[in-house]
Image: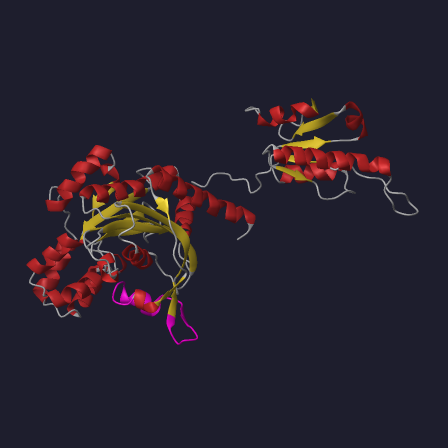
């Protein structure tokens, strides 16, 4: 990742951290390597078997390079449940690994941001999490025409499946099939449902249900939308019965964000998980609701929507030029008089840095001033300080504004004021 690319990634990080701080989320972290037992039976079987990088350590234990953060978080909360102050709002931004084919919006190594609210079963927590999701996109300059948040409820969908006469032991497999609806047509969906040992009537009912809009006034959704209206964010959210999320630990609200008129894969997704932390040894039920997104997918979205601003890779405000030094032809030695401008340039760059003005000293002593100015121009450094023998004699420096091409003579004791002036 070269500087210009890294600057875009840092811009994405800055916006995510800004939203986290705005909503009161605290940063935390966990290990990059976890024992495979942490995930077995608690997350998607497909994720662990097909999409993880696994390592066998010297004791023949299988370790996994973390594909997601929620199981690590659940273990951490269970370990210190008596010491933590609930409800918790936690945020993590760190590396994740998935063993899958790289493609648009998806890499094997990526940074993922996780937002979670813990120990609140209230619909208010659900709405707060949805509010964070929307705030992220608004922070990037997106609006209603660019994205939509599709929501559903695992509780609601399970009740529907029970009403179709589907047995408890088939529910998990059926939900996994429903999660694939957007990737397959209704005919293929029917075939997959048949493989779950459902009869024709049950398959038909599920397909009809998944293709029928759900009323906002239905049970849980009414409570949710009543509060969404109070936040004035309901326009970004739509109920979609096909959204179920593939991970096994979701228990209530589930949601995914989709780009309008662009990529079909989810930009971020999450939901409520009320039983996961108890599975890691907590003495009581600690509910959670959260979501995750990656730098890779957000980058693609911003590129699609032309929302990446012009970003400078260098934050340098001032280049202090080095007056070209003449050398004696015979011995190739610089005289004492010629060292004075260099000495002054070093003193000036030190002074600027001590006053928190980002500054560079040109690192060559034999390059002409014109070359140094071109360097500043190409790197979009707005000001260049020029110090020669005449400037030293008068105790001043020349400042060249690279945008206007104007030069100003400034006394040494006025430098800080000049560069901290809001007009500069």
Q: Position of residue 40 (x, y in %)?
A: 28, 67
As drawn, 327 above or below 75: above
Q: Position of residue 205 (x, y in %)?
A: 10, 59
Q: As drawn, which residue projects farthest toward the right?
A: 330
As drawn, 299 above or below 337: below
Q: As drawn, which residue projects farthest toward the front?
A: 83
Q: Specify how the rendered protein is coloured.
A: secondary structure
Report the residue at 76% width, 36% height from top. 343
> Can see residue 321?
no
Report the residue at 37% width, 73% height from top. 61
Q: Quadrant of residue 73?
A: bottom left
Asked whether, in this view, residue 394 is left or right of residue 253, the answer is right
Total numbered badges shown on the rendered structure: 0
Q: Position of residue 14 (x, y in %)?
A: 44, 42
Asked whether, in this view, residue 20 is left or right of residue 285, the answer is right
Return the residue nearer the eye: 229 or 250: 250
Name the quadrant of the C terminus: top right
| Magenta-tinted stretch | 40-62
Report the residue at 62% width, 29% height from top. 403
Q: Is residue 55 magenta?
A: yes
Q: Is residue 295 magenta?
A: no
> Can see residue 284?
yes
As drawn, 400 above or below 184: above
Q: Position of residue 16 (x, y in %)?
A: 39, 43
Return the residue nearer the eye: 256 or 284: 284
Asked whether, in this view, residue 34 is left or right of residue 355, the answer is left
Report the residue at 69% width, 31% height from top. 385
């Amino acid at each position: 990742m070269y500087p210009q690319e890294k600057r875009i990634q840092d811009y994405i990080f800055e916006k995510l951290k800004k939203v986290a701080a705005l909503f009161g989320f605290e940063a935390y972290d966990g290990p990059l390597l976890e024992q495979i037992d942490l995930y077995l039976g608690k997350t998607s079987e497909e994720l662990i078997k097909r999409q993880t990088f696994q390592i066998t350590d010297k004791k023949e234990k299988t370790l996994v390079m973390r594909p997601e953060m929620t199981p690590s978080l659940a273990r951490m909360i269970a370990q210190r449940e008596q010491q933590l102050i609930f409800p918790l709002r936690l945020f993590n931004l760190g590396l994740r690994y998935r063993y899958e084919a790289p493609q648009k919006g998806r890499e094997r190594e990526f940074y993922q941001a996780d937002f979670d609210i813990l120990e609140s079963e209230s619909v208010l927590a659900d709405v707060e999490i949805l509010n964070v999701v929307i705030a992220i996109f608004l922070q990037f300059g997106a609006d209603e025409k660019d994205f939509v948040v599709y929501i559903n409820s695992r509780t609601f969908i399970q009740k529907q499946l029970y009403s179709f006469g589907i047995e408890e032991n088939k529910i998990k497999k059926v939900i996994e099939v429903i999660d694939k609806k957007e990737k397959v047509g209704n005919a293929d969906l029917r075939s997959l449902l048949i493989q779950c040992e459902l009869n024709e009537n049950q398959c038909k009912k599920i397909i009809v249900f998944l293709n029928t809009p759900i009323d906002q006034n239905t049970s849980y959704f009414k409570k949710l939308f009543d509060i969404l209206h109070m936040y004035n964010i309901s326009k970004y959210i739509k109920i979609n019965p096909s959204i179920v999320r593939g991970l096994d630990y979701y228990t209530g609200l589930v949601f995914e964000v989709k780009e309008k008129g662009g990529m079909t894969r989810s930009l971020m997704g999450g939901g409520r998980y009320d039983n996961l932390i108890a599975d890691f040894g907590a003495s009581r039920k600690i509910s959670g609701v959260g979501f995750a997104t990656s730098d890779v997918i957000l980058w693609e979205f911003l590129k699609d929507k032309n929302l990446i601003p012009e970003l400078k890779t260098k934050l340098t405000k001032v280049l202090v030029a080095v007056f070209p030094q003449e050398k004696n032809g015979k011995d190739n030695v610089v005289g004492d008089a010629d060292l004075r401008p260099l000495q002054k340039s070093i003193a000036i760059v030190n002074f600027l840095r001590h006053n928190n003005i980002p500054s560079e000293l040109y690192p060559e002593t034999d390059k002409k001033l014109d070359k140094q100015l071109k360097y500043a121009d190409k790197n979009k450094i707005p000001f260049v300080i020029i110090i020669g023998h005449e400037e030293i004699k008068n105790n001043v420096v020349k400042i060249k504004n690279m945008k206007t091409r104007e030069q100003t003579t400034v006394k040494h004791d006025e430098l800080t004021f000049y560069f901290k002036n809001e007009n500069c």
